[in-house]
Image (cartoon, rainbow, N blue to C red):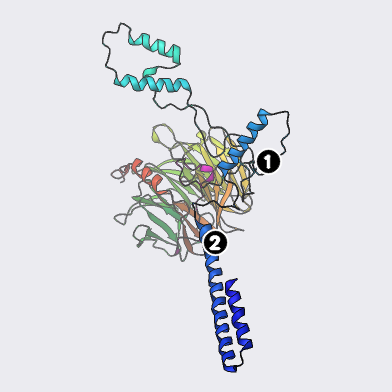
């Protein structure tokens, strides 16, 4: 007020003054004074605002407009319940809305905590008896051993089991009991599992990848497009043999080298069948001039030529030192390569060409398939000699087409798979012991070859008209696992690599395609390799 009073006095003095210059000077001073006053007022207002901010940000001062703290709400709630308990007959006039514990956490309106026990935590239970036992065990460790006790250890053990339900000597200091409860229905745990030692169940493991393209493609010029011939075989030493017209070529799958093993003298003759011995050292070759030739691959030398058939030899199969050959005449001959008089037996159940011939892995049975739609099972006679017609075990005629595709199950020696030609198109699984057909599947395509893949217990089939592809089936359900497409013409034959990871197919489009569809897990592969033992050749020094 004093400052404003002085301003009014100075202003009245200026108005009453007769000198104009004095009046202007006084008014100038007043205006400057007012400007300074206004500036100081602004500074003071800003200073007051900053002081208010600093006072709010101080943690040691109470926040007047903030929500009540949790401990304050609990204290207020407990006080209110205590007052209501002291005077139950009187109604409280004071509003308790501000002291009640809120039903939900402020700012979180998502999900309520489950009311039932359980969920994402397991709280173990330790009862008072267990605490007493733990205390006893701890104090017992510090006490000296009593050597004068008259009570035997058996008696102490009996008392302990009777009183506690277990032997105290075997008890643990920290013993937790109780079982975790199941989470309430509808409960969802949002916590992420960072580590678990539980093995992944086999049912949810990722299935293996089967490539739809071949791993390698080889040219096979001049390959004969004949359904009844068997022109491809893979040895245990990783050599792939293929017959191209009148020549036999070997492809070293390890090194990638190609070798011409033999070529027939006459141009009109051709190769009809190939079969490796179990050891992979010798190759049997069936020809169109009714002979079976035996070749030493390592020395590239023909050991002998065995003539006994009257027609081309379209199928071959080894059983130790005996090689069986099937002819277009319908006869099956057994040749003992150890003796000069090699022809030791003849089987004549087929009326037409024998196009499929396979010995079982254990060497007990010979399966033959023919163009007469028959599947025959022959035994191995006692003493290692071949069987005869009177010993025919089974003869099935369910197929409606030529049976060239035959495959024995490696892990079930009494199981045989057979496939029919264009008129049949069925895969049939046979039990040799019972003589029954276990299962049958219509593939809607001509079946030219079958082989079991033991790495995944699957069955692989090669098809001609009309699909011209390769199909992998799960055994024994025969559910389709994969289709391998790529050949432009019918697939004539297929064979499995020695490690059972790759299947080779040869087709009328004059190509050989290698499909690496059965590669094993590296750990299982190493374990299998350790179990395999090298075996010496049975006929290495006995072939004449």
> How far across and down, in percent of the image, does residue 284 sit?
39, 51
- Tell me the tag on residue 264: none
Mark 1, other Cα within 10 Å: few <14 / some 14–19 / many ≥20? few
Q: Secondary structure at mark 1?
A: loop
Residue placed most toward the observer, 26 or 304: 26
Q: Give the residue drawn at x 26%, y 8%.
A: 148
In this image, 210 relative to 170: left or right?
Answer: right
Q: Give the residue drawn at x 60%, y 54%.
A: 446
- Please say whether residue 5 is visible from this viewpoint: yes
- Please say whether residue 507 is visible from this viewpoint: no
Number of numbered tags placed on the structure image: 2
Q: Is residue 211 magenta?
A: yes
Q: Is residue 522 above or below residue 88?
A: below
Residue placed most toward the observer, 300 or 416: 416
Q: Secondary structure at mark 2?
A: helix
Span colored in magenta: 192-219
The secondary structure making up most of the magenta span is loop
Q: Is residue 125 above or below residue 274?
A: above
Residue placed most toward the observer, 447 or 384: 447
Q: Where does label 1 land, which residue?
A: 96
Q: Nearer the viewer, mark 2 or mark 1?
A: 2
Q: Is residue 438 above or below residue 289?
A: above
Where on the picture, by quarter, is residue 319?
Answer: top left
Q: Where does label 2 land, which residue?
A: 52
Mark 2, other Cα within 10 Å: few <14 / some 14–19 / many ≥20? few
Toward the top, the furthest residue is: 150
In this image, 541 relative to 163: left or right?
Answer: left
Q: Give the residue drawn at x 27%, y 15%.
A: 145
Residue placed most toward the observer, 451 or 58: 58
């Amino acid at each position: 007020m004093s400052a404003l009073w002085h301003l009014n006095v100075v202003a009245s003095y200026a108005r009453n003054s007769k000198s104009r210059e004095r009046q202007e000077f006084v008014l100038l001073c007043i205006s400057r004074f007012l400007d300074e006053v206004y500036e100081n007022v602004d500074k003071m207002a800003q200073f007051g605002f900053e002081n208010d901010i600093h006072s709010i940000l101080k943690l040691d001062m109470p926040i007047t407009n903030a929500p009540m703290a949790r401990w304050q709400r609990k204290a207020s709630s407990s006080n209110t319940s205590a007052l209501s308990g002291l005077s139950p007959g009187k109604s409280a006039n004071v509003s308790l809305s501000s002291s009640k514990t809120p039903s939900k956490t402020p700012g979180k309106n998502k999900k309520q905590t489950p009311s039932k026990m359980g969920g994402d935590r397991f709280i173990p239970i330790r009862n008072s008896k267990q605490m007493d036992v733990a205390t006893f065990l701890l104090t017992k460790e510090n006490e000296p051993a009593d050597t004068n006790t008259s009570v035997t250890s058996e008696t102490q053990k009996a008392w302990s089991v009777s009183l506690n339900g277990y032997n105290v000597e075997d008890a643990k200091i920290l013993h937790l009991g109780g079982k975790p409860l199941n989470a309430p229905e509808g409960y969802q745990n949002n916590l992420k599992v960072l580590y678990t030692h539980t093995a992944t169940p086999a049912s949810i493991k990722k299935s293996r990848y089967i490539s739809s393209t071949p791993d390698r493609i080889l040219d096979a010029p001049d390959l004969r497009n004949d359904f009844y011939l068997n022109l491809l075989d893979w040895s245990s030493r990783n050599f792939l043999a293929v017959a191209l017209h009148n020549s036999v070529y070997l492809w070293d799958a390890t090194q990638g080298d190609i070798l011409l093993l033999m070529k027939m003298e006459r141009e009109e003759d051709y190769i009809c069948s190939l079969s490796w011995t179990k050891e992979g050292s010798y190759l049997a070759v069936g020809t169109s001039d009714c002979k079976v030739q035996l070749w030493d691959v390592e020395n590239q030398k023909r050991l002998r030529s065995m003539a006994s058939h009257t027609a081309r030899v379209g199928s071959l199969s080894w059983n130790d030192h005996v090689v069986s050959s099937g002819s277009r005449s319908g006869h099956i001959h057994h040749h003992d390569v150890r003796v000069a008089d090699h022809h030791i037996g003849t089987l004549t159940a087929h009326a037409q060409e024998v196009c499929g011939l396979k010995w079982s892995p254990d060497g007990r049975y010979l399966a033959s398939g023919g163009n007469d739609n028959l599947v025959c099972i022959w035994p191995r006679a006692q003493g290692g000699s071949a069987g005869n017609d009177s010993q025919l075990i089974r003869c099935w005629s369910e197929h409606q087409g030529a049976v060239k595709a035959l495959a024995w199950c490696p892990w079930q020696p009494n199981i045989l798979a057979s496939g029919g030609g264009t008129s049949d198109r069925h895969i049939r699984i046979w039990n040799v012991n019972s003589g029954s057909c276990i299962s049958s599947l219509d593939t809607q395509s001509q079946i030219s070859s079958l082989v079991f893949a033991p790495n995944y217990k699957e069955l692989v089939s090669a098809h001609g008209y009309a699909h011209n592809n390769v199909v992998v089936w799960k055994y024994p359900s025969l559910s389709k696992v994969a289709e391998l497409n790529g050949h432009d013409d019918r697939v004539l034959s297929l064979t499995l690599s020695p490690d059972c990871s790759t299947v080779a197919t040869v087709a009328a489009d004059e190509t050989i395609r290698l499909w690496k569809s059965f590669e094993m897990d590296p750990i299982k592969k190493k374990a299998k390799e350790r179990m395999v033992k090298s075996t010496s050749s049975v006929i290495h020094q006995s072939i004449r």
